[in-house]
């Protein structure tokens, strides 16, 4: 991989993470601009390292698998419970998605990166009012 291609893939991951993070920050969520940008960029760096190390011989998916595991631990730290309520699941899922976006960008799938960002932003933005409505609706009376 050339230095230009490495840079393009890394900057794509950075930009995608920034877009996802901006949406999260806009909605005042815990993991916002910097977190999602760093997660996407970090995932991309690991994937790019893996691609460069396994150019001739090896399995690029081994490091990708470790990225998925590591992000799982990071996401677990975002989730907390207060009484019967659980908070941070969507934020943790978004961080997980940011890592996936960084990995896709690092692999050189630019169209797929854009599509993934659009889907993530859509789920977090468009479904938010529906989620709030479903959460706040009254329960039917017991019969």
Image (spheres, rainbow, N blue to C red):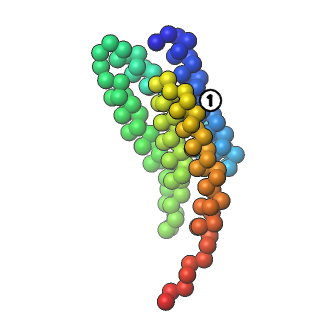
The image quadrant that residue 21 belongs to is top right
**Residue beneath the point at 45% across and 48% down:** 76
User: Could you tell me residue 84's position as x and y percent?
Assistant: 49, 68
Q: Secondary structure at mark 1?
A: helix
Q: Which residue is the extreme one toward the top? A: 2
Q: Is residue 36 visible?
A: no
Frontmost residue, 101 versus 111: 111
The image quadrant that residue 63 belongs to is top left
Count up the numbered dots.
Answer: 1
Instruction: Report crowding for label 1: few under 14, some 14 to 19, many 20 or more residues within 10 A (C-alpha).
Output: some
**Residue beneath the point at 45% across and 21% down:** 48
Q: Which residue is the extreme one toward the right? A: 26
**63 with respect to 90 (left or right):** left
Q: Is residue 82 above or below residue 5?
A: below
**Residue beneath the point at 50% across and 27% down:** 109
**Residue beneath the point at 54% across and 22% down:** 9
User: Could you tell me residue 134's position as x and y percent?
Assistant: 59, 67
Q: Which residue is the extreme one toward the left? A: 57
Q: Which residue is mark 1?
A: 15
Q: Is residue 124 visible?
A: yes
User: Could you tell me residue 136's position as x and y percent?
Assistant: 62, 70
User: Could you tell me residue 113's position as x and y percent?
Assistant: 54, 32
The image quadrant that residue 128 belongs to is bottom right
């Amino acid at each position: 991989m050339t230095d230009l291609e490495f840079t393009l893939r890394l900057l794509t991951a950075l930009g995608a993470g920034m877009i996802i993070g901006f949406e999260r920050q806009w909605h005042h969520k815990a993991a916002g601009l910097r977190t999602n940008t760093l997660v996407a960029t970090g995932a991309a760096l690991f994937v790019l390292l893996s691609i460069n190390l396994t150019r001739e011989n090896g399995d690029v998916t081994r490091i990708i698998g470790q990225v998925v595991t590591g992000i799982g631990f990071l996401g677990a730290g975002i989730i907390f419970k207060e009484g019967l309520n659980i908070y941070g699941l969507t934020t943790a899922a978004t961080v997980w998605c940011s890592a996936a976006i960084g990995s896709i960008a690092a692999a050189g799938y630019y169209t797929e990166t854009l599509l993934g960002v659009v889907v993530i932003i859509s789920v977090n933005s468009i479904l938010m009012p529906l989620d709030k409505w479903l959460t706040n609706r009254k329960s039917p009376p017991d019969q």
